[in-house]
Amino acid sequence: MHRCVLTALLAAFAAFCTLSVSWSRSTDPTLQPASPNLPLGASVYAARCGMCHGTDGKGDGPYAPLVTPRPRDFTSGKYKFRSTSPGSIPSDADLARTIQDGLPGTSMPGMREFVGGDTLRALIGYIKSFSPRFTAERPAAVRSSATAAAPGSPGAGKKVYDKLQCYGCHGSDGTGADAIATGLTDDWQNPVAATNLTEPWTFRGGAGTEDIYYRLVAGIDGTPMPSFRGSASDRELTDLAAYVRSLGRTPVWSMKAGEVGSFYDSLEKKEMNDPVEHGRYLVESHGCIDCHTPRAADGSMLESLKLAGGMTFTLGPYGTVVSTNLTPDKETGIGGWTDDELKKAIMTGVRRDGSRSIPFPMPWTSYASFRNSDVTAIIAYLRSLPPVQNAIPAPKSLNVFSYLWAKFKMLILKQDFAVTSPPGNAGSARTSDTPQQANGGTR
Ligand code: HEC
Ligand code: HEC
Ligand code: HEC
């Protein structure tokens, strides 16, 4: 008797599962209503997308200057991660995948928890309305032959990797270490790196064999990654997708304790072979570039003054300091400094003239623990930059009355002072993209 109840329950459950499968099919985002619910789409967009993609979909929301890569400009109608022919608009299912899963390795978050069903359909309709391409064209789907049933052979795929010269951009081992084509840019003139194929968790379009197959057949529009549809047979591309998948290494978070140490040791050894590259990494990850490059009024970096100093910091009672020019210009930058002088400045805050800078904003106290090889690499990188002439004004202290008043506010009234940084270059360089600051002068 009990068994009967159980069987009935199981049957009901099975029926429910079938039902829910067909239910989820009927909410398939590819089944767009004839006219999308634009007001609903617009309100979800304003709440969840506009801060990056911009109110008008131009990819210029307030967060946009802070993230690399930049958020997509929807008005261009150009999409990277598609299951459609090169140059084609994406399918609704492609857009649904991006929105729900996000793009790993970028700031584009997965929104599965917040958008689904009707809101997802409305949102897709809304972002499509930013580009006239979606009314004028239809997505040209490519059919995938890379399925779980026919997975492809990594061994055969290795030969295709060499034949199609993937190593030119991704390197012979997929890490990009010995790539020939470097310094690539995308159609929006932003730098773009060929993906490290041994780190599949950063594949934006997904790391399954079928996902990879689509990237090979469809290309990644707007980037140097081309489509290989005409260059190899379907079988070959399926094998290649399997090979790329086989390159994936164990991520650090899944390694055993002993493996982590030796993994970083081997990584460090590789980096030490290329100090300039290691230095670039340190300069970008330790904030040097953020303080030593002046900014435009919209917060974006003034590219032509990269690392040329000129950012002003007002520091309450401590007056005003301007970040120094770290490019190898002989007169106004570090061109005439010795390695020792640079090392002292970076790690102990001792200026070239022997005086000491206060421990902020230049955070030399946190750089005091750099390894010798790190500072050497940083110096090697700074010396590899193009010299930029930008004479930096000396720090300015307050007159004695303002100083005492500021100290009084700080010590007696216990008021914190705000550190502010007006946009623009306080140095001498004048370029078309450089708003000159009123107090600009020379040191
Ligand atoms: C924190 C910033 C951020 C937010 C919030 C955000 N995105 Fe994105 N989005 C990005 C970035 C960055 C990219 C570009 C990634 C790249 O180029 O690889 C992107 C790309 C996209 C793409 C293009 C994918 C392709 O194939 O080219 C779509 C579609 C998209 N976002 C939709 C949305 C929608 C819809 C929302 C709101 C539900 C949203 N995004 C919210 C940062 C964001
Ligand atoms: C001309 C340079 C170039 C060549 C040649 C090239 N790629 Fe790429 N590849 C790129 C770039 C750049 C990206 C990163 C695109 C981006 O920013 O989204 C990329 C991304 C990828 C990705 C990651 C996709 C994702 O979902 O994020 C895979 C996988 C890939 N390439 C495989 C290959 C294979 C296999 C070949 C050879 C058939 C190849 N590539 C040839 C430049 C290239
Ligand atoms: C939070 C902002 C900030 C960061 C981060 C920063 N700096 Fe500085 N740096 C400054 C400012 C401001 C000065 C000028 C200080 C002064 O004159 O007292 C300066 C001065 C210097 C000097 C010249 C020392 C002198 O006073 O003559 C060097 C060299 C230098 N920084 C290198 C670096 C390097 C390398 C990094 C990254 C590892 C870095 N800075 C990170 C703000 C910063």
Image (tube, helix red, strand yellow):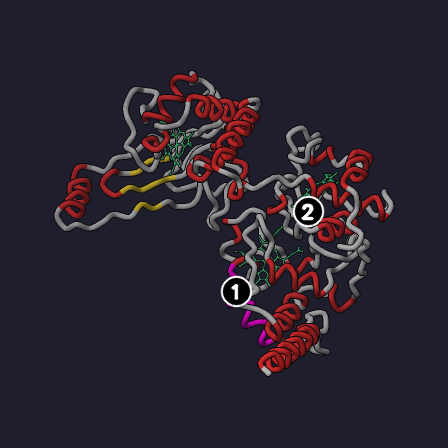
Quarter where residue 132 is shown: bottom right
Tag 1 residue:
48
* Rendered position, 306 above or below 378: below
Check disc 2 and give the amino acid type. Answer: Asp
Residue 368's spot in the image, x, y percent? 34, 28
Check disc 1 and give the amino acid type. Answer: Arg
Residue 312's spot in the image, x, y percent? 37, 39
Q: Is residue 40 magenta?
A: yes
Residue 234's spot in the image, x, y percent? 85, 48
Q: Nearer the viewer, residue 88 or 278?
A: 278
For the C terminus, give its image quadrant.
Answer: top left
Residue 333 can be seen, yes or no: no
Tag 2 residue:
187
* Rendered position, 306 above or below 343: below
The secondary element bearing badge 2 is classed as loop
Residue 412 can be seen, yes or no: yes
**Callout in the foreground (2, 1):** 1
Q: Is residue 327 left or right of residue 164?
A: left
Q: Residue at x 54, y 72 (%)?
A: 43
Q: Nearer the viewer, residue 365 or 147?
A: 147
* Rendered position, 217 above or below 116: above
CB at disc 2 and ligand 1 closer than 8 Å: no
CB at disc 1 and ligand 1 closer than 8 Å: yes
Prevalent SS, magenta region: helix
Q: Nearer the viewer, residue 310 or 116?
A: 116
Q: Residues within 10 Å of mark 2 (few under 14, many from 20)?
A: few
Residue 323's spot in the image, x, y percent? 39, 34
The secondary element bearing badge 1 is classed as helix
Q: Which residues are magenta?
A: 39-51
Quarter where residue 239 is shown: top right
